[in-house]
Amino acid sequence: MELVALPAFTDNYIWMLHDGSQAVVVDPGVAEPVMQALQQQGLRLAGILVTHHHADHIGGVDALRPLLQGPVIGPKAERTTACDRLVGDGDHVSLLGLDLRVIDVPGHTLGHIAYHCAIDAGAAGVRSDHAPVVQAEASGVLFCGDTLFSAGCGRLFEGTPAQMKTSLDRLGDLPPDTRVCCAHEYTLSNLRFALAVEPGNRALQRHAGHCQALRAAQRPTLPSSIALERSINPFLRCSEPEVIAAAQAHGAADTTPTGVFAALRKWKDSF
């Protein structure tokens, strides 16, 4: 099984899983990168997974339908007609012989979902159109759309801070070596904010230098891992003293994890 990051628009990634003959893609906001990858590798499109209704995640679905030999699966609580099968928390999706569990993660949008596939992807390569990036063994893959980003999280367009904090906590409880497949290459800007929040975090400092080198070489900073995000992502570190102090300095109403998260998210919106 190979995991592929297909760049789209300015900073989106369309994630593709394939077994050498069939492929599944996640959040195809535009069809062309998917069509090109399918043709170049001789793959059949066995399914499409959608995390939420925003156009940069579903805009390519209709154009891909003539190639599609399976379902378009998406959130049952969203305002979209792009999907054939609607799923929600605890449902399971079977594609390419894989079992993907659906996790409700409201916040960015009210019906946002994520897909967690508990597979041993250790032998799989991870690549983009630019360069190969081989990861260590992982016990699973997470397709999290715009909920969790590396060193950040999605804006609250529809949900509340409490909803997003709960969603992030659910994702943060996944196995530490889970590969985190975010939908945008926002890592460098997120790291700048994270360093403003927690300048004494040495893991964060090291990772910022690593990601700067990756982007200078036109390589993706993703996928991340749950373990890495727990160590660098301020939105998963709302109980850390330095993070709490930074949130208080930026108007946190209280020092509860939700209060800290709300202050951080508001600060990040204007950072």
Image: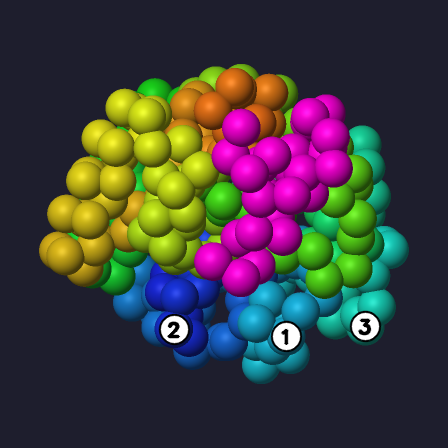
**Residue 177 falls left or right of residue 128:** right
Circle 2/circle 3 CB separation < 8 Å:
no
Disc 3, SS: loop
Residue type indicated by callout 3: Thr
Magenta span includes 144: no
Q: Closer to the camera: disc 2 or disc 3?
A: 2
Where is residue 94 drawn, in percent x and y? Answer: 67, 39
> Which residue lies at the image location 38% right of the left edge and 73% below the top edge?
10
Mark 2 or mark 3, which has the lower sequence index? Answer: 2
Where is residue 108 drawn, in percent x and y? Answer: 69, 54
Badge 1 density bin: few <14, some 14–19, many ≥20, Cα 10 Å: few
The answer to whether residue 95 is visible is no
Residue type indicated by callout 1: Ala
Disc 2, SS: loop
Q: Give the label on residue 55, or none.
A: 1
Q: Quadrant of the N terminus?
A: top left
- First to last magenta residue range: 245-271
Q: Which residue is mark 2?
A: 10
> Which residue lies at the image location 34% right of the left edge and 33% below the top edge?
199
Cα distance, mark 2 to mark 3? 25 Å
Q: Which residue is mark 3?
A: 81
